[in-house]
């Protein structure tokens, strides 16, 4: 089981009912005050999917739509992820999806809320939730979508570009890494970025003991 990579702050730990089942964790997460992000976010957006599950996918944080609807990966990046998973032959309904940070971090520009990347301290503060999700989900493989998620599990010195598409092991956990689907949406050549993302997912899928 991975361990939090360093923080003097208690963060979410005081709010996490360690050893409880998924429903108890989800319920407790709604009251988390482990960092300041809860103050502006609409709600906690906890992970969703089968428990246990062979595949767990971890993104960065909820986006605007996720914050409004209270569900993971339901915005533009989530729709692209759905399409990429289908192209890679992965059944989304068989995977557990979550984020390294459970509250939406943003700045307001007029009527729009613009995503801001969480600070390292915010990722570390939220880590106890991710640790407990991994415990209850018991995945064969965790796929980190983007550098923030990868560094949450593999340490702050981890470089995504050096290990993209690879499966690594940390504290007994098998961890695959690729880009976040939002990076595909921002790419200059979106078609090329999408095909590379699907190729990563196909490669990572091969490391599962059974197909999805």
Image: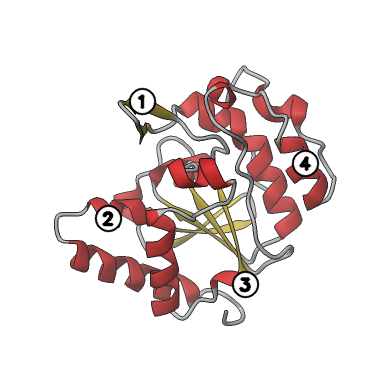
Q: Find disc 2 in the rendering and name its residue.
A: 185
Q: Is residue 178 visible?
A: no
Q: Position of residue 174 (x, y in %)?
A: 57, 60
Spatial CA distance of label 1 from label 4 is 28 Å
Residue 107, quarter of the rendered image: top left
Residue drawn at point x = 60 percent, y = 27 percent = 125
Q: Earlier in the sequence, mark 1 or mark 3?
A: 3
Q: CA distance from mark 2 to mark 1?
A: 21 Å
Could you give the CA–CA distance between mark 1 and mark 3, rounded to whole angstroms?
35 Å
Give the residue drawn at x 65%, y 62%: 49
Q: Quadrant of the C terminus?
A: bottom right
Which comes sooner in the sequence, label 2 or label 3?
3
In the picture as drawn, the residue positioned furthest to the right comes out as 20
Report helix, strand or loop for mark 4: helix
Left-right relation of 17 to 206: right
Image coords of residue 163 (percent x, y)? 36, 56
Residue furthest to the top: 8
Give me the C-alpha separation between circle 2 and circle 3.
Answer: 24 Å
* Label 2: element kind: helix
Give whichever of discs 4 and 3 has the lower sequence position: 4
How crowded is the residue under tag 2: few (<14 C-alpha within 10 Å), some, or many (20+)?
some
Residue displayed at 44% across by 58% down: 78
Q: Is residue 98 left or right of residue 27?
A: left
Which residue matches tag 1?
Answer: 108
- Give residue 94's mark: 3
Q: Nearer the viewer, mark 1 or mark 4?
A: 1
Query: Which is closer to the viewer, label 4 or label 3?
Result: 4
Labels 2 and 1: the sequence-earlier one: 1
Give the label on residue 27, or none.
4
């Amino acid at each position: 089981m991975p361990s939090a990579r360093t923080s003097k702050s208690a963060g979410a730990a005081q709010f996490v009912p360690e050893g409880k089942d998924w429903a108890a964790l989800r319920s407790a997460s709604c009251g988390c005050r482990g960092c300041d992000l809860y103050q502006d976010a609409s709600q906690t957006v906890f992970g969703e999917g089968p428990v246990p599950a062979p595949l767990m996918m971890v993104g960065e944080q909820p986006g605007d739509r996720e914050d409004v609807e209270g569900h993971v990966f339901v915005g533009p990046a989530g729709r692209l992820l759905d399409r990429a998973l289908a192209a890679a032959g992965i059944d989304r309904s068989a995977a557990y999806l979550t984020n390294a940070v459970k509250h939406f971090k943003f700045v307001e520009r007029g009527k729009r809320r613009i995503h801001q990347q969480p600070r390292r301290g915010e990722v570390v503060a939220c880590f106890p939730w991710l640790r407990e999700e991994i415990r209850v989900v018991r995945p064969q493989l965790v796929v980190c979508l983007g550098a923030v998620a990868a560094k949450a599990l593999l340490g702050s010195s981890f470089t995504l570009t050096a290990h993209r598409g690879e499966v690594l092991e940390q504290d007994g956990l098998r961890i695959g890494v690729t880009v976040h689907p939002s990076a595909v949406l921002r790419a200059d050549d979106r078609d090329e970025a999408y095909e590379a993302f699907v190729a990563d997912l196909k490669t990572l899928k091969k490391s599962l003991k059974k197909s999805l």
